[in-house]
Amino acid sequence: MSSVFGSGEISTSDEYLHEIIGFIRVHKDGRCERLIGNNKLPAGIDSSTGVESKDVVISPETNLSARIYIPKTATPNQKLPVLIYFHGGGFVVESTTSPNYHPTLNHLTAKSNVIAVSVDYRLAPEYPLPVGYNDCWKAVQWVASHGSGHGPDSWLNKFADFSKVFFAGDSAGANIAHNLAIRFGLDPIGGINLEGIILLHPHFGGSDPIGSELGKNKKLKAFTDQFWKVATSGSGLDDPRFNPEKDPNLSGLGCSKILVVVAEKDCLRDRGLHYKELMEKSGWAGKVEMLESKDEDHVFFWFDHVSENACTFFNTISTFINHGN
C-alpha cells in the first residue's frame, strides 16, 4: 500500500460526518479537523538553494494568497518563465506553506530557473469545488495583470516572461492545472501565453475502474475516490473535472504541450497513463511527454530531492520548461 495513503482503510465509524483516515475528519457540526499539512514554514531565503520567497495577497475579500519564488540567478536583464503551481492534498488538506510544499517549490524553482507562483486556494469541504478551481483561476488572472510590467508585484514585473507561462501541480493540484488549461482554451486570459502544463502524479478518476484498479489497487481506488466525494459534496465520479474522458472540451485544451509524470508504485499511475492516451486521441493538436519514476510511490518528491530518481524528475521538468529558451 502507498505510504502517503496509509493502509487505504475506509472509515466505518458514524462518529463523524466524513472521515478520510489519516487526512481529515468532518464533524457533524461542520467543523473540519485536518490531520496533515498543518505546520507552516515561513517565506524567506532558502539556505540550500539560494531561492528567495515571499507571500502576497491576491484577494483580501476571500483571503486568497500565493507564495512567490525567485532563483538566486534572477536578473531583470533575462526574463524567466512563469510556473503557476497548484498544491495537492485531495482538495481538502495542505497549503503553500506546508513542509511538503515549501522545500519542494524552492528546489523546483532553483532547478528549473523559473519564477514560481504557488497558489494558496481555499479548501473543501468548507469551500466545496468549484471554489478551489475559481480561486486558482483568479490567481492566474492576477499573474496576467503583470503582463504590461505594471502589476501589483515587483518581482513579476521585473523578472517574468509572460510569453512562457506554465500551469503545474501534483495530485489534486495536477487536476486543477488540467482543468484550468481547459478553461484557458475556452476563455483565454490576455497578457499571458500558456505554453504548457505539468501534471505530477495527477488525481483523476471515474466510476469504471481501469488497469490496476481492477485488481491490486481496487481498495486504494475506493480510498482516493473519497477525496473527490468530500470536496464536491457528492458530485459523481464521472464529473468531467474528475474524469477527463467525459469532457466534451478535451480537444480544446489551451496550451501546446503537456508533461505527465507518474510513479511506478502509485495507485494513481494508470489514471495518468490513461490521461496521456485520452489527450493523444482527443484531437488536441499539442504534444504529450511522459516520465515514469521507477520504484517510486505517490508524490515521492515531497520527501526526496536528491536521489537519482528525484534528479531525473526535476531535470525532466526543467527541460520541458526551458527547451527552446
Image (cartoon, rainbow, N blue to C red):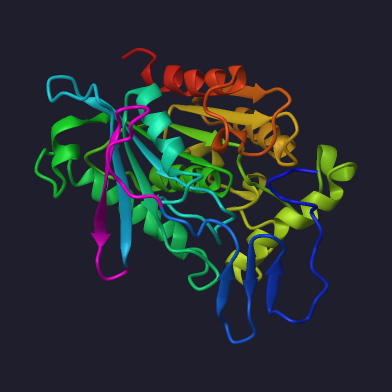
Location of residue 11 in the rendering, given as x and y in whole percent from the top left corner: 79, 68
Q: Foreground residue, 71 or 205?
A: 71
In the rendered image of this protein, does residue 207 appear above or below residue 295?
Answer: below
Location of residue 287 in the rendering, given as x and y in whole percent from the top left corner: 52, 22
Residue at point 52%, 64% (across, down): 129
Residue at point 80%, 52% (across, down): 7
- Drawn side of residue 45 relative to residue 28, left or right: left
Q: Quadrant of the C terminus?
A: top left
In the rendered image of this protein, does residue 68 appear above or below residue 115?
Answer: below
Residue segment shown in magenta = 41-62
Q: Quadrant of the N terminus?
A: top right
In the rendered image of this protein, does residue 62 appear above or below residue 70?
Answer: below
- Drawn side of residue 193 relative to residue 31, left or right: left
Farthest residue, direction bottom: 29
Residue at point 59%, 87% (across, down): 29
Location of residue 50 in the rendering, given as x and y in whole percent from the top left corner: 30, 28
Provide the major secondary structure of the magenta segment: loop
Farthest residue, direction front: 47
Reply yes or no: does residue 48 show up in magenta: yes
Reply yes or no: does residue 121 show up in magenta: no
Q: Foreground residue, 137 or 296?
A: 296
Q: Foreground residue, 174 or 19?
A: 19
Residue 31 at least partly seen: yes
Farthest residue, direction right: 215
